Image (cartoon, helix red, strand yellow):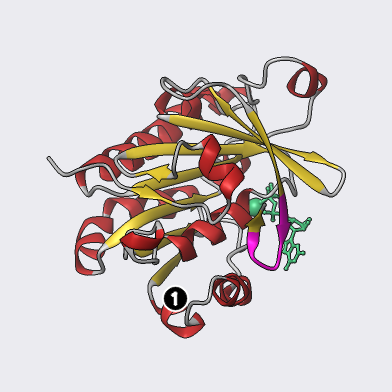
Amino acid sequence: RQDIGKITTGTNCLDTLFDGGVETQALTEVYGEFGSGKTQFAHTLAVMVQKPKTEGGLDGGVLYIDTENTFRPERIVSIAQAHEMDPEKVLDRIIVARAYNSAHQTLILEEAGPIIEENNIRLIVADSAVGLFRAEYLGRGTLSNRQQKLNHFVHMLSRIAETYNCAAIATNQVMASPDVFFGDPTRPIGGNVVAHTSTYRIYFKKSGKKRIARMVDSPHHPEEEVIFALGEAGVMD
Ligand code: GTP
Ligand code: MG
């Protein structure tokens, strides 16, 4: 069995929260309201995983499953430049798979094995993991069907992360409800399937121009909050 790897987030604050970085052989759920920084975080990791191991990366490629058409090459360029990396080379090592519906999103993952091996993929992003399932299965009659299909997807994502020694990121948009803000943010609406399958769960929240991240329900991280920012370098201290 291969050693677990860690990917630096490019920030001291989030690395502290992750106890060094985002782990391989694990599924990490990133949830939070719109604009909280989930996609920027995923873009930043897609750059940082390519750093050499001596600099906190895994010298690996990325499979980026883009379900909401929010992957932005120009953001990758900007983040790479901020970290003194060659933007063209960084973009070359990110395989973007645009998923058009939830069945297609699942198919991409089912066929990912050879792509992961041939391209030394160390990070798989599903941004958003949940959005297409949520949109397609509206109404109570289909709720269990939706949960079953989503369950299949996230379990496969988790299993692939273990099998291929990859870090897997699943983003999940949640409403900013009062109990999320003031109480225990462990029950994102409709996201329990992802929550139950994830090894780690991180919650992002907006606070004016700043962002707050909290590690939730982790088996071996203290539950703490850190403040971070979003900018040219992606997630920033
Ligand atoms: P949803 O997908 O809608 O749920 O949101 P999200 O959590 O993915 O948010 P996202 O990561 O897209 O964050 C959007 C925010 O990032 C914006 O409101 C900006 O604050 C910030 N942002 C995005 N791009 C840039 C940029 O190029 N420069 C700066 N300074 N900030 C940026
Ligand atoms: Mg997003």
In this orientation, which residue lies closer to the viewer: 188 or 134? Answer: 188
Residue positioned 53% across, 23% down in the render = 192
Residue 125 placement (x, y as % from top left) = 45, 53
The span picked out in magenta is 229-234
Give the crowd class for mark 1: few <14, some 14-19, many >=20 residues within 10 Å. many
Q: Quadrant of residue 61?
A: bottom left
In this orientation, which residue lies closer to the viewer: 66 or 52? Answer: 52
Name the quarter where the N terminus is drawn.
top left
Residue positioned 56% across, 39% down in the render = 30
Residue positioned 61% across, 43% down in the render = 13
Above or below 129: residue 175: above
Q: Which residue lies under the disc numbered 1?
A: 90
The residue lying furthest to the right in this view is 208
Q: Quadrant of residue 189?
A: top right
Above or below 55: residue 34: above
Residue 110 in sight in this render:
yes
Residue 46 placement (x, y as % from top left) = 47, 62
Q: Ligand 1: does it lie within 8 Å of the C-beta at label 1? A: no
Side (left or right) of 188 relative to 20: right
Secondary structure that dominates the magenta span: strand
Residue 149 placement (x, y as % from top left) = 42, 35
Question: Is 233 covered by the magenta stretch?
Answer: yes
Residue 219 placement (x, y as % from top left) = 41, 20
- Amino acid type at circle 1 is Val
